[in-house]
């Protein structure tokens, strides 16, 4: 099969399968062969389920031969972040503490993919337990950026973004707690949607911070990402936080255009702290949206400057609670000892990496007696203020615009020993997450060194259709998303 197949949209691949131009088995096999040739060098994938993927593809072909109506992702290869449970397939979260763990069930979003006749081909690399901004904290080695193999792909969904950018799969799933699909999408020159909290079920997603985690799609185009979101969104009775609200037709929304929409620009985000090349690319994007018929207004988010502090208190506190289940008793790594307490301590000491340990200790400290009010409770109050800032902004606009990240991809190893510098890579993605909003990242330019730059749009809760309306029109008017690494 032509090597150009790797750059075709998922929707086009699906149409070829449904129309009988290519079998799902041949299509999936071609991507698996590519993964076998190129995947190890990129480090984007932790496990490839070749036998399971080909068996699923044959089932799709059998259904087509029987004249059955195929799903909206029929035959499309999909990679899934390795913190989403997959029945009988390793799910490690990039951590030694879950090495070899094979869940007895699929996550809800994986169920939805299979029901849509998509083919799950691989599990992607990630920062350990989704804690990181560069994919360097993975216990199994870092993923690399396809645009420059000495650069990070972003995190924590770096493997998913890198796999899509390199053409190993047309689409992938990641999880986003504070920017973990958007920031890697920005670094790798692809598109990602962080849905509203509650729009997509978290059942089967290994929890990091339960009030923030969401599953989102990564693709090369807005339309592909919208198609995947339409498949995975909706109420799930097994997740009490999933919203019982109708799911919009996101694919149709992509065709409506943004004329008349008001775009709120956060001018502080285009000031000191962001790289000049990022500022220039985002500035050009603002003018492109204006040319498409959008009205551009200035908005203020006065409490957004506290987002990094708030996030690393709230998220780490929730992580310290959630990760208590990884104790060496029920699943994953166990380091035997003379008593349970010693066994648990030794298991965690060996199983967790330094970044996870750092976050657990910070979170436990913030929740401890005498410090709860001063840290965790205060952080929650400021989180409410951040949400209020957005509420006021959305009285004046339909979308809020910022860069996705203040810089392009940085070098491998550059920030490993400087946690604060690493955390600041998410300074623009954290505020929408803390406010429970939906947001999208789309490519909007390249640096002189040839590294991608991302544009972020945020919308009120459950207004994902607004995001894809504007972002799809922007991609129609530009060609940044059509570039791919050589």
Image: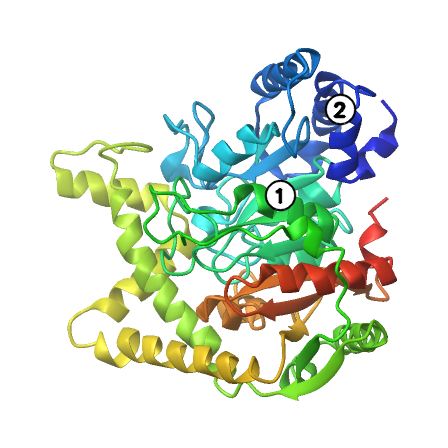
Q: Residue visible at 41% across and 54% down?
A: 243
Q: Return the residue found at the far left.
A: 339
Residue for badge 2: 17
Instruction: Classify 10 Å Cα crowding around label 2: few (below 14), some (14-19), many (20 and above).
Output: many
Query: Does dot 1 land on a helix, a strand or a loop?
Result: helix
Residue under label 1, please give it: 228
Tally of marks: 2
Would you say 437 lies left or right of 44 here?
left
66 versus 188 height, above or below: above
Tell me which corner region of the image, top left, top right, bottom left or bottom right, holds residue 317: bottom left
Task: Identify the image quadrant of the N terminus.
Answer: top right
Percent x, y of residue 280: 81, 77
Let me know if residue 123 appears in the view.
yes
* Residue 286 image offset from top left, x and y in percent: 78, 76
User: In the image, residue 23 lies at what x, y percent?
Assistant: 75, 18
* For residue 36, side relative to residue 130 (left or right): right
User: Is the residue 226 above or below the residue 108 in the image?
Assistant: below
Q: Quarter of the image containing the C terminus?
A: top right
Distance between mark 2 and mark 1 Cα atoms: 17 Å
Foreground residue, 354 or 14? 14
């Amino acid at each position: 099969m032509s090597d150009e197949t790797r750059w075709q949209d998922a929707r086009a691949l699906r149409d070829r399968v449904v129309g009988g131009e290519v079998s799902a088995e041949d299509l999936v096999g071609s991507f698996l062969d590519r993964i076998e040739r190129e995947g190890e060098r990129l480090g984007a994938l932790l496990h490839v389920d070749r036998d399971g993927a080909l068996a699923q593809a044959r089932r799709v072909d059998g259904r087509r031969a029987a004249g059955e109506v195929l799903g909206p992702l029929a035959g499309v290869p999909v990679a899934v972040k390795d913190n989403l449970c997959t029945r009988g397939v390793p799910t490690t979260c990039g951590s030694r503490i879950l090495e070899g763990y094979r869940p007895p069930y699929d996550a809800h979003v994986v169920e939805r993919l299979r029901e849509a006749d998509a083919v799950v081909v691989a599990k992607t690399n990630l920062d350990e337990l989704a804690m990181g901004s560069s994919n360097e904290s993975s216990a199994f080695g870092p993923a690399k950026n396809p645009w420059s193999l000495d650069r990070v792909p972003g995190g924590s969904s770096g493997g998913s973004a890198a796999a899509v950018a390199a053409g190993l799969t047309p689409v992938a799933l990641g999880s986003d707690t504070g920017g973990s699909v958007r920031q890697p999408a920005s670094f790798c020159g692809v598109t990602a949607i962080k849905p509203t909290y509650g729009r997509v079920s978290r059942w089967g997603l290994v929890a990091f911070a339960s009030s923030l985690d969401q599953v989102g799609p990564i693709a090369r185009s807005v339309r592909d990402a919208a198609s995947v979101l339409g498949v995975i969104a909706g109420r799930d009775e097994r997740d009490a936080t999933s919203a019982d609200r109708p799911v919009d037709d996101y694919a149709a929304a992509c065709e409506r255009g943004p004329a008349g929409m008001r775009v709120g620009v956060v001018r502080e985000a285009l000031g000191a702290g962001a790289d000049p090349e990022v500022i220039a690319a985002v500035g050009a994007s603002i003018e492109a949206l204006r040319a498409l018929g959008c009205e551009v207004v200035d908005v203020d988010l006065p409490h957004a400057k506290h987002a990094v502090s708030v996030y690393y208190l709230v998220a780490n506190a929730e992580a310290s609670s959630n990760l208590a289940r990884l104790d060496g008793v029920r699943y994953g790594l166990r380091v035997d000892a003379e008593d349970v307490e010693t066994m648990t301590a030794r298991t965690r000491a060996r199983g967790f990496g330094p970044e996870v340990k750092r976050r657990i200790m910070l979170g436990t400290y913030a929740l401890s007696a005498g410090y709860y009010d001063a840290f965790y409770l205060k952080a929650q109050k400021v989180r409410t203020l951040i949400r209020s800032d957005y509420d006021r902004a959305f009285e004046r606009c339909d979308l809020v615009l910022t860069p996705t990240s203040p810089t392009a991809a940085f070098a491998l190893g550059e920030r490993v020993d400087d946690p604060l510098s690493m955390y600041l890579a998410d300074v623009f993605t954290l505020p929408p997450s803390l406010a429970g909003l939906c947001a999208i990242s789309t490519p909007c330019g390249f640096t002189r060194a040839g590294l991608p730059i991302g544009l972020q749009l945020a919308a009120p809760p459950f207004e994902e259709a607004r995001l894809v309306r504007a972002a799809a029109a922007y991609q129609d008017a530009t060609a940044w998303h059509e570039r791919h690494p050589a």
